[in-house]
Amino acid sequence: MSIQYADIIIDIVHGAVDRPFQYRVPPSLSGKLSLGERVKVPFGRGDALRDGYIIGFSESPQVDPARLKEIREAGEGEATGAEQLIRLAAWMKERYGSTMIQALKTVLPSVRRVRPAKKRYLVRTASREACESLLEACRKKRQKARVRLLEAFLEDDALPYGMVVQKLRVPASSFRALVEQGICRVVEERQERSPIRAVKGGARCLILTDEQKAAVDGLLSVWDGDRRPSLLYGITGSGKTEVYMELIRRVIGEGRQAIVLIPEISLTWQTVMRFYREFGEDVSILHSRMSAGERYDQTERARRGEAKIMIGPRSALFTPFPNLGLVIVDEEHDTAYKNETAPRYRAVDAAIERCRLAGGMAVLGSATPSAGSYYRAQNGEYHFFQMKSRAVGESLLPSVEIVDLKEELKAGNRTIFSRRLTERMRETLKRGEQILLFLNRRGYAGFISCRSCGYVAKCPHCDVSLKLHRDGRLHCHYCGHEEPAPKTCPSCGSRYIAGFGTGTQKVEEQVKKMFPEASVLRMDTDTTSAKGSHDAILSAFANGKADILIGTQMIVKGHDFPRVTLVGILAADLSLYSGGYESGERTFELLTQAAGRAGRDRLPGYVVIQSYEPGNYSVEAAASQDYEGFYWQEILYRKLLHYPPVYRMLSFLVTSKDDAAAEKRAEKLKRLAEGLEGVEVIGPAKAPVSRIKDIYRYTLYVKSEEEAPLRAVKEAAARLPWDGQVLYQFDLE
Ligand code: ADP
Ligand code: ZN
Ligand code: ZN
């Protein structure tokens, strides 16, 4: 047992992440150091003692061991902000099977230094008369650049430097001459590139409802006591944001900082402004459209403790706050919180771990919590708070109808709109109200269904739908089962069996044919590729610029549409067959959210859900907005089929440039897992996306009631060296 060398990065503020240095571990510290730990090491000329962080261990030296220096001291006391982030990276590496460097690059995204933006101005210092007479002289000498500059100075006293150089094309030599002549000088104004340009408005003055008060009191006592994670389950409009803000006020009042995670798509201007009105300059935001420089400024503000609240999508979790106290994960069920590249972390779990490291508190909020989080709240693993009513106005539930699409086809209706939906659309347009048509596209690609009887091709072993691949065969992404695609429906013999591929564009064409007088907007990846067009379409619709908005997931979040009174869900079941044990949950979430968009502003709302499987519990529960009803069914299903959160699952993603090698490795892992007691193995199979950038991908799932066997499988897998990469993910709880 001899870990003798440690890889250390020095002083992360200077961004040495790309270059770890190796040090010897002295016998006195042997076995006592851990990943992410802060140590003191001699560094550079004169061997001054510097802070460093351990990011890896090895048993062999990379250079002549005599040339390696020794670690002097191990860190003591509280972990610093940076140390916590590096420990978080170590946790990610362990839990999600990435390399340490991949994990570090995730938690320390801003190591690349960007020069802060400086605003420079040329300011006129001489009198107008002096300028005019010099202008005369320059004209005579045909010094055109100076002429342009002097003319500009006669109009404006101060000229932005960039404009002078680019627009007036004045070379530096020319204005230097003018500076020397005392005509003008360069003034620098250091300016933080703040993404928030509005002014602080008046603070809100509202009185919390009884439910909100109860939630706030409960959460504050968690803060004062045992800081296990909390789940705040509150219906849409129950005022969760106000609860968060109360909690944040307390936390920053005690000199600590808070992170609020919001899925990017819901991170609207209105949301940000609510925080900004409340907390002003203490608030900072991050989002993916910011430049590297803007991000750098925001993180620096946080590091220096100038910003106390960071709002942003999942990457905001890695804000280097010196003394983090609180992480709120709003809409914690959202799939945007899953990172799809290595390390494939789940932001909810990472947030909880980060809070644990910081001695802080994690609060998960949702109107439709993930089955996993709700399960943990029921088990007492999380604290649980609930808000059942709206903060303002009574909660007018929309009236929901479910239409059976099989019946439509039987009645000879081959269009994508049921008779009921068509009728509702006509009524709504007549009343001058707006319509939202939602096309659930998630996972529709590839699965095939019968339009006569609703039959969906499923795997005989796995209870997930089979997907049609380019080879014309149906594949199971869980166990690898495959079979030829049927030409006629195996269940009823109908020829109407095909991949479901209705796109938003096709929907738009049909709508225009049926309602030529209505104006239609469409929102999907085609229409929103330009920067900002996403927001532009949504606000155009919110401002009544169109009668009908057609779109995918994108339209069910964020913006409020007060004049929408009809929501049509064109094919509710599609995500039921997206494969994966979470597809019922995804369907329920999407339908609930979509349905919740109807009739928000006193006008009565209608929802028509078109479905091939109207009796499915995800569809039925969504129609009656019955989260608990859904949850108990879903948990039963997970129990029966041994899926998380009831069972624990370890999923492997084996990737390699060599297809056969990846498959062989996956098979090897399978044999290794099968040798252990108390585990079930599913797979291996090609991953849903079986090749990315010429890297082949295979998945393997290992389930167990206990955590220990899964850990053992993982450990054993790690001991088999290989030049491909094996990523894994624990669904432990
Ligand atoms: P949620 O996030 O739970 O959907 P919000 O926090 O966005 O709900 O609140 C919904 C609306 O109700 C917002 O417009 C908010 O300003 C308002 N609101 C929340 N709490 C109160 C309150 N106690 N009194 C008056 N209005 C409130
Ligand atoms: Zn299968
Ligand atoms: Zn059929």
Image (cartoon, rainbow, N blue to C red):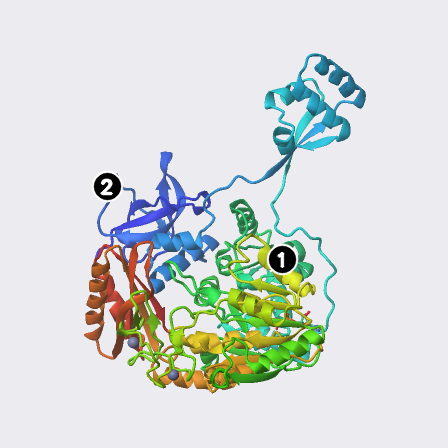
**Is 123 situated left or right of 309 in this image?**
right
Whether residue 606 appears in this view of the structure is no
**Is 389 situated left or right of 462 in this image?**
right
**Is 305 situated left or right of 640 in this image?**
right
The residue indicated by pointer 2 is 63
Q: Give the camera-side residue of 698 and 411.
A: 411
Q: Residues within 10 Å of mark 1 (few under 14, many from 20)?
A: few
Residue 658 location, x and y as percent? 23, 56
Name which residue lies at 44% across and 51% down. Answer: 108
Q: Residues within 10 Å of mark 2 (few under 14, many from 20)?
A: few
Residue 344 location, x and y as percent? 38, 62
Q: Quadrant of residue 239?
A: bottom right
The amino acid marked with disc number 1 is Ala
> Which quarter of the frame holds ligand 3?
bottom left
Residue 349 location, x and y as percent? 44, 67
Above or below: residue 546 compared with residue 186 = below
Where disc 1 sits, the SS reads helix
Whether residue 32 appears in this view of the structure is yes
The amino acid marked with disc number 2 is Val
Give the number of marks.
2
The residue indicated by pointer 1 is 536
Quadrant (top left, top right, bottom left, bottom right) of the N terminus = bottom left
Name which residue lies at 51% across and 67% down. Answer: 506
Mark toward the viewer: 2 or 1: 1
Quadrant (top left, top right, bottom left, bottom right) of the C terminus = bottom left
Above or below: residue 702 compared with residue 107 = below
